[in-house]
Amino acid sequence: MAALLDYIWLSTFSMLIFFGIHWLFLRNEKTLKLSRIYLLVSPLLALAMPLVDIPVDFAKPSVSLDQTQFYRALAVQEAPDNFVATFGLPEITVQGSKLPILWTQKDYLFLFYFLVLFMMSLRLVWIFIQMRMLTERGWYQTRYNLKYEYFLIPTFGLAPIFSYFNKLFWDDTHQLNKEEEAQILQHEIEHIKQGHTYDLVYYQVLTTLFWFNPGIYLLRSALVDVHEYLADDQVIHRLPNSEAYPKLVVKMAFKGIDLPVGSYFSKSTTLKRILMMKKTPKINWFKSLMVFPLSFLLMALVSMKTERGLGFLSSNITSNLEDIRSRLVASQDSLDFHVKVKRIQNPMHYELISEWYKGKLQAQIGELVYEFSDIYSDEDYVKVRGLIRALRGTSVHYKDYSGALKRYQVDEPASPEGGMATWYQNIMQEVQIPQKELELGIGGVLQVEFIVDEKGEVIQPVIKSSFGGGLDEKVIPLIKKEQWVPAKKNGKSVTSVQSVSFAFYPPQQEALADAHHFFNSAAAPKASPSVTQTGEEIFDVVEQAPEFKGGMQAWNEYINKNLSYPEAAKSNGIEGTVYLVFVINQEGQVENPEILRGVGFGLDEEALRLVSESPDWNPGSQRGKAVNVRMRLPVKFKLSNTTIAQGITGSESKDVHHGESPKPSVAFMEYMRKNLRYPVEAREAGLIGTVTAAFKLDKNGNVKDVVITQSPSEIFSKEVLRVLEQNKAQWHVEGVAYGQEVKMPVTFQMAHLPKPLRSHLPNEVVVTGYNSTRVDTKPKVKDLSPSWTIHGEPGGIKLESDPSSNMVFVIDGELRPDFIPNTDLKPKDIKQLEIVKGDKAMELVPLYGEKAVNGVILIQTYK
């Protein structure tokens, strides 16, 4: 259906343009034979050009509908379901003995088309019947002219004078003198000699088949005019007195029935015929021949297919389906649901999570669509959302906007007319977290990618990172609502690609905490593949490492120039370091960027954008040959009052500060840590979360006007207020503006529960609560290393190591370089142990140092 609508649009567009070319360049010129040929060929070209596919590798504007949201939505809707797999309980299909006939919109449209086609065909048949009736009525008085080879058939006033193939129908009721009769006869004979009836029948068939195309009717009308001009031109050339003939044309009027397959002496073209007769015979050949290059340009516009321009080239990288299958099957051990996984072509969005409705939820991630059903409880819904989070990265969608510049390619980036901060705040005021997600404590980042054209209009907005719950669909119209100032390059406005993140986090404590963290893995991140999609090896260590063109100084300049601190993170005071892993291929291009360790609030997405859009690197080499190399890179985000400072950890980072930030004294922080208590009622209820307190500092650094701006529970708020109001220690305020507001986070976490989302604000204080009840009586051991010997002990395990082993110990998330097994930790206190080796260990180097290459032992204790 989508392809059919696109064909109808392109053929209609082409016919209208062909008619426009004729109207501008041939309508008033006496190149009549050229006009006739043009009008006969152009409808065939218009109908054929959309079917021709000429691939080109240069940018060109596109008139096709295939880049519109309507076309893509329709194409996805009608595409056959390409189910990759089905998981869950077996489906039961109940069928009756009689199945109803279900009609789609496509069926109704085809029915309407054929009904109109049938009526048009009946009309055409009726015309030919009338022609036959006229022929039979005057057959006995018919005369045959041997010289011009035509039949002269009288109509007895039932039809005006007209010709039809080799028949000339004559209305003998007209009062004409011999000279006038001769002129009219000569006019109709010219129609017969030039075969104009064939042209009209040809157009009558086209209008019957393509009755919905307005261009055909316009072209046919123009052809009828040309027929009359051709016949008139021949008559005038044979007359000694050319002034009499136009008077005869005016004298004749319509009479009788109108048959559209005949050529009439007098019709609605009378005035145009007279004007053409009086026109000078001189031809403007330059103007007339312009129809050829213009027609060729139209053919190129329609038939040459390219995804460039403001369209995009897209690609997908999808994980091994067995890996996806194993994840879904494993999740069903504790979650009963049904899911279908299907693959779609050319998805519009990078990802899109639908609203949970009647037990169903759909999540599009890259080219894969997961259709979840049988979700009837809030807890199951929260777990499914967690599963969707875990499935991110299983299928990655890429878009390459070849006709639009990236941020680093412009001198001045595009921005809203009212400023980015105001634009962001206006959108955040108009949209709120959906009620269900608010109640269940579901938060996240919504990232939108769009194009700002040379006029400052926002086009083609797509979801890059979906929030779900129906929120995405509300933000898209708001993105397109406001006018932008286009990006500038060399002083000129250019089209550019923009990416904006919006953070939506509920202010209250997460409900169903266990469900929220059900799919959070305490293990190391999944290792990136060791081969590319084409089977080529990816190296982790090479003789010559990849390098950004211009070195690390050029890389830092690229970051400082192109990094845009997300408004979501800025407004919440979020800063931190995002660790990324990506591949530099043999051509020096960045591939498969992924977050190794993130921060949230849009910082992860911004770091991914920076790496994804970076210019080409100098590729790495092994034994003199360019190879694919996996890179790991940290990107640091730092706020300094109102100024953003960006840098690269491990390199020469240039932080820009305007004034100093207030810092708490050691005594202040020590007092907070010693006096904050985990409220008993909160510990028994299993409540966790982060309280954000805001206060002002006087000129001596004393805390005053304390308020709680965000808290998961009133219980936590009272505890934080109590300790802050009693804390008499001071802050360092040298060089700080008087009365400056300071935010301080206090995170409450239970030792036996997964850690909540940290605020990543500076000066965070963490309060850990302990539960007397212990779960799991046996420790869980994964991936045992040959360097360690495991001995069973009552209630635990005992570790004995190979003296040559140099592995790194991480106890409850904390790096312990001086850890001594069986001395610093009793076997019965180990709840879970996991040994990370190989590629997985390599990915932990940014977190735990170079020794992590030898392996990492992750230990979780009962505390």
Image: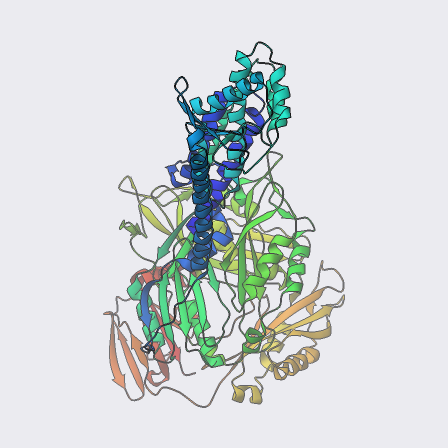
- In the drawing, does residue 47 fall left or right of residue 702? left
- Front residue (pair 713, 114): 114
**Residue in the image at 55% along x and 73% along y:** 437
**Residue in the image at 62% along x and 43% along y:** 486
Whether residue 632 is visible, yes or no, is no
Farthest-out residue, front: 140
Whether residue 201 is visible, yes or no, is yes
Place of residue 186 in the rendered image (x, y in percent of width and height, measured from the top left): 50, 19
- Front residue (pair 266, 169): 169
Place of residue 36 in the rendered image (x, y in percent of width and height, measured from the top left): 48, 26
Whether residue 509 is situated above or below residue 308 in the rendered picture: below
**Residue in the image at 42% along x and 59% along y:** 107
Whether residue 305 is situated above or below residue 30 in the rendered picture: below
- In the drawing, does residue 267 fall left or right of residue 856? right
Whether residue 356 is situated above or below residue 215 in the rendered picture: below
- Front residue (pair 375, 617): 375
Place of residue 555 in the rendered image (x, y in percent of width and height, measured from the top left): 49, 45
Farthest-out residue, top: 240
Which quadrant of the figure has residue 728?
bottom right
Say how the picture is coloured: rainbow
- Front residue (pair 639, 809): 639
Q: Quadrant of the C terminus?
A: bottom left
